[in-house]
Image: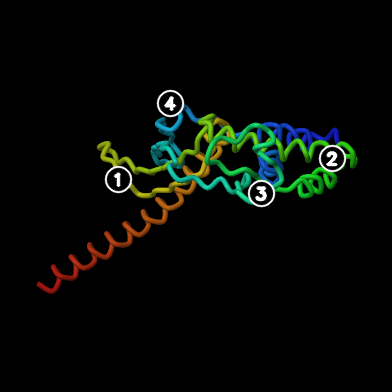
Amino acid sequence: MLTKTSPLYLEYLRNRAKGYLPRSARAYAAQPARPGIDWDGYTGYATAEVEYKGYVVRLKQEYDECPDLSYLGEYSHRSGVIDREARGDMNRNESRYWSPMTTEAEHFKALHRMGMDKNTAHEKARGYVLQDYRRMESYNRDGWSMIGIIAKAYLVDGEENEIECGEAALWGIESDFPEHIDDCAWDLVKEAVFKAEANRMKMIEKRAKEILTLSRGRILS
C-alpha cells in the first residue's frame, strides 16, 4: 500500500488533478520522464521529426473527427448521476442527465487502497466525478479536442534516398495534455521502428532470394 508521502502517491494525485482517470494516473506516475517532442505548428496540425535506432521518424497530428468519449461518461434522457437541467447546464434539445464511466465508488476504492482515509477519499471521489463531468462539458463547448498521431519510419541510405519501412498510428488523444501527447508520440515512434525492422528483414530476405535466383540463372545459361 502506498503512503500519503510517497513520491508515487503524490504524482498520482497530480495526474488526477490534471484529469487522468485512476488507472492512467497511476500508470503515468510510475513511468520515468521522457524527452519532449519538438512539434512544429498548432495542436491538431503539428508535425515533428525524430531519429530513433538509425531511422528517421516523421510524426503528424490530425484532428479525430469521431472520438470515443465513453471513458468520461455518457449522456442520457432518462436518468443519471448529474441532472444537467438542475445545474443550469442543459441547452435546448440536449440530454438532461449524465453518468460517469468511473463511478464515485470506484474512485473511492482506488484512493482508499492507496492509503487515503475514508472521509478524504469520499470527498475526493465526489470531486473526481464532477471533474469528469466538467471535462466532458468542456469538450462539447469546444474547450478541447481529440487528435490522432501518425508516425512513419524512414530508412535513409548513403545517397539520402528515403525508404518508408514502418508506420503506426493512434487516435483519441486529448489535445490539451502536452506531456501525454509526447508520451503517445514516443510509443508510436518505437512501434513504427519495430515494424520497420521487421519489414527491413523481409526486404533483405527478398533481395537475397532475387540475387540467388539471378545467380542460378546465369550458371544454367
Inter-mark Cα distance, 4 to 2: 38 Å
Q: Label 4, on which residue?
A: 42
Disc 4 versus disc 2: nearer the observer: 2
Q: Label 3, on which residue?
A: 101
Looking at the image, residue 36 sits to the left or right of residue 203; the answer is: right
Q: Nearer the viewer, residue 158 or 215?
A: 158
Looking at the image, residue 130 sits to the left or right of residue 190; the answer is: right
Q: Label 2, on which residue?
A: 121
Q: Label 1, on which residue?
A: 163
Amino acid type shown at disc 2: Ala
Amino acid type shown at disc 1: Ile
Disc 3 versus disc 4: nearer the observer: 3
Inter-mark Cα distance, 3 to 4: 30 Å
The residue depicted at 62 percent of the width and 43 percent of the height is 96
Label 3: state its secondary structure.
Answer: loop
Q: Assess disc 1: are there few (<14), some (14-19) or many (≥20) residues with their C-alpha within 10 Å of its C-alpha.
A: some
Q: Assess disc 3: are there few (<14), some (14-19) or many (≥20) residues with their C-alpha within 10 Å of its C-alpha.
A: some
At which x and y percent is residue 181?
53, 35
- Earlier in the chain: of badge 3 and badge 2, it is 3
- Earlier in the chain: of badge 4 and badge 2, it is 4
Disc 1 versus disc 3: nearer the observer: 3
In the depicted structure, whether residue 201 falls above or below residue 99: below
Q: Nearer the viewer, residue 41 or 120?
A: 120
At which x and y percent is residue 52?
46, 39
